[in-house]
Amino acid sequence: MLLPLTVAFVTGLWLGSYTPYLPITVFLLLALAVITLTVLEVIGRLTAARSLALYGGLLAGVLYWSLFMWVAAGTPAVSQAGPSSVRIVGRVVEPVRHSPGRLVTVLALSSLGEGNTLRPAEGRLRLTWREPDRDVRQGDLVALVARLREPSGTLNPGGFDYAALLKRRGIDGMVSASGPGALSILEADAVPFRWWPWRIIDGWRERIRRAAETALNGPALGIFLGIIIGESGYLDPTVRDAFMATGTVHILSISGSHLGLIAFLSFFLIKSGCRRLPTVWLEGLSRHTTPTRLAVIVTVVPVTFYTLLAGAEVATVRSLVMILVFLIAVWLGRDRHLLLALAGAALLIAVHDPRVLFDISFQLSYMSVLAIALVLRWASREDRNGDPDPGLPRWRLGEWLRDYVWITGAVTLVTVPLVAYHFNQIPWLGLAANLIVVPLAGGILVPLGLGSAIWLLLSGGSTLPAGPLNQALLNMTAAVVEMLARVPGAEWHVASPAIAGIVIFYVLLFAAVRPSESRRIRWTGTLGVALLLIWWSWSPRAVPDGDTLRVTFLDVGQGDASLLELPDGLTVLIDGGAAYDTLDMGRAVVAPYLWDRGIRRLDHVIGTHPQLDHVGGLPWIVRSFEVGHYWGNGLPRDEVFYHRLQEALRARGLVEEVAREGQTLVGSGPCRLLVLNPPVSIPTGQSPGSTKAGGSLLNNLSVVTRLDCGPQSFLFTADVETDALFRLIVRGRDIRARVLKVPHHGARSSLDVHWIERVHPDSAVISVGGHNPYGHPAPAVLVAYARGGVRVLRTDRHGAIWMTARLSSPTIDIHATREELPEPVPVGVSMLHTERRNLARLWTEWVGI
Amino acid sequence: MPNLAAIMRQVLHALLPVECAGCGVALGDDPIPFFCRRCWEGITPLRGPACSRCGHPFASPVALRYSPAHLCSACRLRPPAYTRAWSSYAYAPPLREAITLFKYKGKVALADALGDLMCAAWPGAPEVDLLMPVPLHPARLREREFNQSLLLVDRLNRRLRLPVSCHNLVRRRQTPPQTELTRQQRRKNLRRAFVVMRPDKVAGKRILLVDDVFTTGTTVNECAKTLRKAGAADVYVCTLARTL
């Protein structure tokens, strides 16, 4: 009964998550469920008790979700977000995450104010401290002066919604501090008693981190800190990408797999150790408890210790819950019912916080454990068939290997849709890579590293024991993974599958592996799964119809990135956003959007001018996509991002082609992409320097392009300022356009009312980040466009903006991501109308058309 | 008011459901692990007429009408080394399932319930000085993790309160399991399989030997023989179940 009940409850929660948007539909579905269950009951396919349990579970799920969200919404949000700095006092309530030169944690706000007038306040703030000069532990009461921001992230169609993730984690606001002394710790001697245990653990983590920092370097340091204390910030993103591509990224964080391996090791070491005791002792022991039960009890200790050492993050605690439930099942001798134990664990976790169902890490780890459980059950059934006598021990290595290969395959298969959906990747190499890397990590790296860490804590020293050994083995693992990642086609990127496709995949998979189904159904299921996998791996582009073009202005925060998909299938990318040490917009925003559109080749990439917010994300794009031509303005910069770009171009055998006024970048086909700026007279190769004047010069020399497709015209003005705008008028070329990408994120220095009149656009797009330090877009700019009757769209307000137009028709359809999100249905007359619109919006997410 | 333990069991069974190993019905607050109340209460002691030596049940009470000490043919042909053997229950479902789960599937949670059955049916007759389980070979012990007979002895001893000796009598040869063998083979299989380490500790003692299942009695007989040779005054045998 538990299994169907859990499925019903989880389905109910899921339905419940739609109730604010589709109340009528959810109600109708619930009514439909009643009818279906009644019919099944009448025709005798279902017992009354079971049907009642199913419906009860479903209804309980819907109600529990609504209730939970209602209660969760009751926490006071921080409404102090604004441009001015305030004094913030709060207590550190979550383990501090470190990366080189930076720490991140969560503060529970206690008071807030300007100057000396502090008022009590509530809420949870995410705190980032760059260049910290001291350690912070949980329970510390800290004070800082900073600007309070709302949780924000970029908003792109099918993109990762960071703001929603933060809100889901209960974050009400964000603050950052920079430099030594930016944070002060108050009442250091009066930390409440309840924080003491956590502070001790923080102390251990700190010591391990310091010792590792001195003993290890390179990828070894990043992997070590990741797998031993759950600090993921030290790993180089390129190494992480290699793990991602080979489907082995799960070993980099302390999730279920490491915890499970430690549990497994501890359990079997103790069990077999006890079995090897002298007979008299063993028999004495067995009068009180069996080695298996003793191993269960003892295993709780290292697993819990490891969880605490990992900072007791939600994901780790969740894995701990699953392992403890499983250990209890073994203790009670119910390990045959692993699936039921899992269902019980899911129920516990979902009741604790139902929002977890939408959490990637939960979905991945739960599906993996489910796959492992199913394979083990299947394997044990096979064993029982072949071997009725459980008598004498046999050599089982062959069976272990067989099960292991099956498990790896099963886990890879069941996680394919989730990884493809969230990460646009099919890590097919994981089939082979995990066979090597998982035993290496679980059997050697984690035990060795954990052993070193514990020895370090016990000995009280400050050097990491077995440092060189750790270093060598960890680096070797990284090298193996990077080598595997270089296999051609290893990084296979795909479009996010539609949710309906994912549901169909799991239904077919279930049909394919269910032993009780007929052979025909199982074959149909297998075939369906295979076809879906092929379709997803292929991820074809929509066939160009020779008529439709699509221009997208991506939300890359403060920066530019526009994608042109022309009627004949040509693709042009203009700029690629910024790249910071923790966030590369090329990787995080531009690339996923391209994959989602099925684009694997860019015919032209234009880096309008060498500034971070325009070309920072391009190196990643150049490395990961096939690029036809790369265009720039030919001016070099002595900056890290510029060198990275040049290096990426060289690695792909590309050279920066210099764009100058009058050149036609795209001339064949129905469309023409013409360069309007910089003028021909500008020599290449001279760096304008990094001064303010140099920046202005660079902006004025950025590549301006104009796209003409039949009746449609788009003007992409990069960052040009008034000088260049004036020159564009003087040169006398046609600058009239229906859509204008507003120059320089709407800066005051690029405002020329006369020029706007000459362009005379219908719509203007400002590509800008929310709360940027430059004050873009300037109010005067907004006023100027409003006066001209231009519809202004902003990526910070609307998210990504995409426009579809036809050669055969003068209209342009404008879509803003924010407006495509479902909105809560109000009670009243417009209910049906809103619900219809929500259905249309969700249809895209569901069916992908 | 239902007691707390029953509520806990109910909750546990809801979370980790388990079916009765006897009849397949889902368990609620049933106190015996793996078995429903009905099945467990269906286990009744053997009460019919039986051989006064080995406890072998007779088909009809006629056999005992004239001589209450009538022996079965096996005992008359080849008198066993033990003085008297009792078997409390028939080795039949659901007790058979319980013993299999307990012995072969490591469900030690059943030890208490099975021990209680043994205590309940204990005839309480002879005066004994020492309790002894039938030993397991060390290799088997390592594999099984416990000696089922020793666990039963411990449960029985909660009532008898006598000294227990579990290391004196040992099995020195690893023998194939008895289950598949005939009586002849069993006897051969077990010949000189047991040995008494400290004969002085058993000399002159009245010993109660405990085992889980009595099939042909070969195992307990072999143990009894070894103990008698070592000087034991009397050997009685108590087993939980016997095949019929």
Image (tube, rainbow, N blue to C red):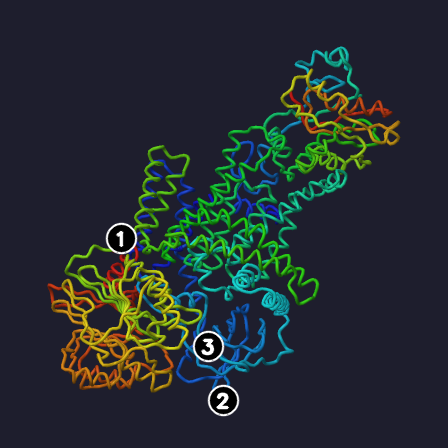
Secondary structure type for disc 1:
loop
Residue identifier under label 3: A175
- Residue A667, labelled with which disc? none
Q: Do labels 1 and 2 touch, CB within 8 Å? A: no
| Location of residue B224 in the rendering, given as x and y in whole percent from the top left corner | 79, 23
Residue identifier under label 1: A540
Nearer-the-camera pick, A3 or A92? A92
Task: Point out the tag, 2 or 3, that comes first from the N-terminus.
Answer: 2
Give amino acid for label 2: Gly
Pointer 2 local density, CA inside 10 Å: few below 14, some 14–19, many at least 20:
few
| Location of residue A427 in the rendering, given as x and y in whole percent from the top left corner | 40, 52
Secondary structure type for disc 2:
loop
* Left or right of A556, for residue A363: right
The C terminus of chain A, quarter of image: bottom left
**Foreground: disc 1 or disc 2:** 1
Q: Do labels 2 and 3 touch, CB within 8 Å? A: no
Seen at 59% across and 81% down, the residue is A186
Q: In this view, does A216 lie above or below A510?
A: below
For the residues marked 1 and 3, what is the alpha-carbon distance in whole angstroms?
Answer: 42 Å
**Foreground: disc 2 or disc 3:** 3
For the residues marked 1 and 2, what is the alpha-carbon distance in whole angstroms?
Answer: 59 Å
Chain hosting mark 1: A
For the residues marked 2 and 3, what is the alpha-carbon distance in whole angstroms?
Answer: 17 Å
Chain hosting mark 2: A
Task: Point out the tag, 1 or 2, that comes first from the N-terminus.
Answer: 2
Give amino acid for label 3: Val
